[in-house]
Image (cartoon, rainbow, N blue to C red):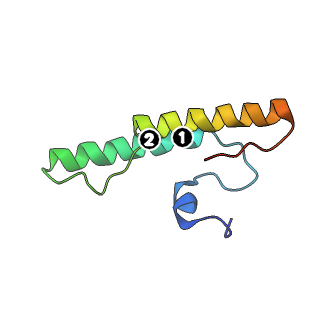
């Protein structure tokens, strides 16, 4: 999907038209954790290894809550 952000394209393993979700999520998490473990075992810094934090998870919950409010009120909710 060339219209996607390069970071999003890097995270996509399945391609357009296929079911995504847990497969992609777990795959990306396992990959990142493996990178962090490998770098740590080699004594390298972890500043270039990214994986989601508790704050990212909380932001995801906030997004879902706003989706539910939007659906319940049949109006877009300001997401700021």
Where does label 1 land, which residue? 25
Please state, as top left, top right, bottom left or bottom right, where the N terminus lies in the image: bottom right
Residue 75: which disc? Answer: none
Circle 2: element type: helix
Task: Give the x, y percent position of residue 59.
Answer: 53, 39
Residue 22 makes an appearance in the image: no
Task: Give the x, y percent position of residue 49.
Answer: 32, 52
Pick out the residue farthest to the right: 74
User: Residue, x 72% and y 36% (percent of image)?
Assistant: 67
Question: Splitting the image into 4 quarters, where does residue 79 fall?
Answer: top right
Q: In this view, does 30 lie to the left or right of 76?
A: left
Establish if 80 lies above or below 23. below
Task: Give the x, y percent position of residue 39.
Answer: 22, 50
Pick out the residue farthest to the left: 43
User: Residue, x 65% and y 34% (percent of image)?
Assistant: 64
Circle 1: element type: helix
Pick out the residue farthest to the bottom: 2
Q: How many marks?
A: 2
Taking depth in this image into account, of 28 and 62 the one nearest to the observer is 62
How packed mark 2 is, by other alpha carbons closer than 10 Å (few <14, some 14-19, many 20 or more), is: some
Question: Splitting the image into 4 quarters, where does residue 60 fall?
Answer: top right
Q: Distance between the residues labelled 2 and 1?
A: 6 Å
Q: Do the residues labelled 2 and 1 touch (CB within 8 Å)?
A: yes
Where does label 2 land, which residue? 29
How packed mark 1 is, by other alpha carbons closer than 10 Å (few <14, some 14-19, many 20 or more), is: few
User: Residue, x 66% and y 43% (percent of image)?
Assistant: 20
Establish if 2 lies above or below 53. below
Task: Give the x, y percent position of residue 80.
Answer: 60, 47
Q: Is residue 51 left or right of residue 3?
A: left
């Amino acid at each position: 999907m060339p219209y996607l952000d390069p970071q999003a394209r890097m995270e996509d393993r399945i391609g357009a038209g296929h079911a995504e979700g847990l497969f992609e999520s777990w795959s990306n998490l396992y990959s990142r954790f493996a990178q962090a473990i490998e770098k740590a075992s080699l004594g390298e810094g972890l500043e270039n290894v990214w994986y989601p934090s508790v704050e990212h998870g909380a932001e995801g919950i906030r997004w879902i809550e706003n989706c539910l409010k939007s659906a319940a009120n049949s109006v877009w909710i300001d997401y700021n």
